[in-house]
Image (tube, helix red, strand yellow):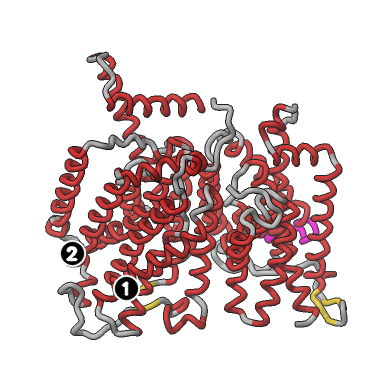
Amino acid sequence: MNAAQVLNGLALGSLLMVLSSGLAMIYGLRGVANFAHGALYMSGAYIAYSVSDRMGFGLAIIVVPLALAVIGVVLELAFFRPLQHRSHIELGLITFGLALIAERLVILIWGEKTLRVRPPEFLQGTSTIFGVEYPSYRLAIIVIALVMAAALILWLRLSNVGLHIRAASQDIETAAIMGINVDKVSLIVVSLGSALAGLAGTLAAPYIALDPGMGNAFLITVLIVVVVGGIGSIAGAMIAGMGLGLIQTLSTVWSPSFAVLVPYLALTIVLLWRPTGLAGKRIS
Amino acid sequence: MTTTAPADDITGDMVEPATVKRGRPGRMLIGLGVGIAVLLVGLAVPYVVTDTYRMSLLLDATILSMLALGIGFMARHLGMISLGHGAFFGTAAYAVGVAITNWGWSPLNAVIFAILLGSALALVMGVLVVRASGFGFLMLTLALSQALYQLSVQISAREWTGAYDGKLITYEPDMTFLGLTQADLINPGLFWPFAWSALVVSGIVLWVVGRSKFGTTLEGIRENEERMRFSGYNTFLPRLIAFVLSGSVASLGGALFAMNAGYISPQILGFTQAGDSLIAALIGGFGIILGPVIGTFLFVYAQANFNFGGNLHLLTGLLLIVVLVFMPGGITGTLQKVYRRIRGKDRQVSDERGRSGRDIASDRADASELRAENEQ
């Protein structure tokens, strides 16, 4: 085990962290496990491919989250809000249908070929850190993700909107009675969650190859992260995401066959030991 | 509109009607009679459908229906939506392959072994997952079945499962399965009686179990698990038994699938297969035992006829959304609703006499219809 492997783990953990914090936010507020989150992430990566092809990667990292935020608004207005009185499972299965559609649309637009995105010029080389040569772009992923995570936590803790989001996540009915505009809060959360998925997709695009199965492959891991972290807990999801990324990468060095099972083992162990997840909100 | 927050369980609309009229042995006998009649009529299908391709589609749908039947049982009686029943289907299929190819077992023993192994897996998985409800259950079943998929495609599992190459089942030419040679097994017309009988018998068993006292206990748990627990019922064991039972039906399907196909692709355990069978069951509707079966037949038909350029998932995704948003009971649920509305109108005109048990039952259904309308 050397520093490069630890950094690889941090890079994977960073992606999981960004992705799962968005999923956890939506889950906490709407009570719906968004099965379309993997599809949002994938769409983000593909849009990033097209944008960076024409206007450069620097712009993609701003444009893509904005585009995904718009998709999030549509999702909220077309599905989450009108159907909020339906059971959560039904709504979850609707997002499952959306994911199927999105996956097919991505293939129709971009094709089934594996695509590659080049990172910006100044991040293409390697940097020396902890005595190892390490790709600069992966360092950038780690830095961006950590900054984003810190900003998100601070925003939730310190801002008024953050207070409303936390209140509504705790108990959406009581929050509404207390005069919080739950619809507005939900709109912010769903569009922000989608934007985060877009950001994760953009960050991942130059790091991994783009193929239409990338969403599903990640979705299951991210769902596991959210359950392990404690459903609805954003900090729990972030910690679980980073932890899982590290453990999985490091165990790959030891045994690749074992590494693919790590998320499932983690899920089973955590749920047997602490059925409510690490951060302890009830799973139901 | 109700003021309570929506629960994580599926709404009554999805499983309506649960208004089973128990304590009437007559109805049970009628049901059994209908089941046996369906079984006998179905056996004649290969004589009517002579086209091999159509016949193989019908056979595929019949075998996959057993998977959907298992999923439907959990959804109807416990309100638990499973994405993991493909694991039992797939495990049983692989078990047949391994027992015949690697161990040289006779096909019949291999099938029995496969069903037992699939059920044992359901028992182990059930202990881990049935305490969860709603999304917890959905995600746990998904995660554990995907873990199995990951295991099956490992290089180290190649000897058993063939990893990504899949598993080709080969056996001695003189071995037969209930009188069928390997060449006969692949012939859909000759294999049909086994698959059809297995499906109808499984359906009847699940139907009888659903109407028994045990079925009532399950529905009590579905409606309010906490209250059942406080009333002195063990709520864990019934859920576990139901899970294992539905898993056994899926295993039976998987074992027959392997016998007929002679080849097992790792996709059988994959996410897409799990999603497809759940979608098929949902579109058919969970309200009656036939719902998931009808859904599966439609799905297989659509897969064969509307898969323009691989766009099947575009259509199923759309259809899933349409069904969930506009007709939560699936196709069969909507038909029932229409039927009940027509019959309800007739009754209002013709008689206003005393309320029999049946009226109370349909009143309950009407009330839930009202609720559905109010909610819109």
Give the crowd class for mark 1: few <14, some 14-19, many >=20 residues within 10 Å. Answer: some
**Badge number at residue A202:** none
Q: Position of residue A78 (x, y in %)?
A: 59, 37
Q: Indicate yes or no whether the magenta region holds residue B26.
A: no
Q: Helix or strand or loop: what does disc 2 sit on? A: helix
Q: Nearer the viewer, residue B81 or B317?
A: B81
Q: Which mark is residue B113?
A: 1
Q: Residue at x 46, y 40 (%)?
A: B231
Query: Which element type, helix, strand or loop, lies under badge 1?
Result: helix
Q: Which residues are magenta?
A: A48-60
Residue A18 image position (x, y, % from top left): 73, 57
Q: Residue at x 21, y 69 (%)?
A: B187
Task: Confirm whether residue A230 shows in the render.
Answer: yes
Q: Is residue A50 magenta?
A: yes
Q: Quadrant of the N terminus of chain B?
A: top right
Say what amino acid the circle numbered 1 marks: Phe
Identity, as a three-letter code, of the amino acid under mark 2: Gly
Looking at the rendered structure, the number of numbered marks drawn on it comes to 2
Q: Which residue is mark 2?
A: B189
Graded by Cα atoms within 10 Å as few (under 14), some (14 to 19) or many (20 or more), the crowding at tag 2 reads many
Residue closest to the far front: B232
How far from the left and from the top, in percent, is residue A250?
A: 70, 76
Q: Nearer the viewer, residue A122 or B362?
A: B362
CA separation in Å, label 2 and label 1: 25 Å
Q: Tell me the subunit letter for badge 1.
A: B
**Label 2: chain letter:** B
Q: Would residue B242 appear left or right of A76 to someone viewing this image? A: left
From the viewer's perspective, tell me whether residue B25 is left or right of residue A218.
left
Residue at left offset 71%, top offset 54%: A279
First reached walking from the N terminus: tag 2 or tag 1: 1
Q: Quadrant of residue B266?
A: bottom left
Q: Which residue lies at the image location 62% right of the left edge and 36% below the top edge?
A: A77
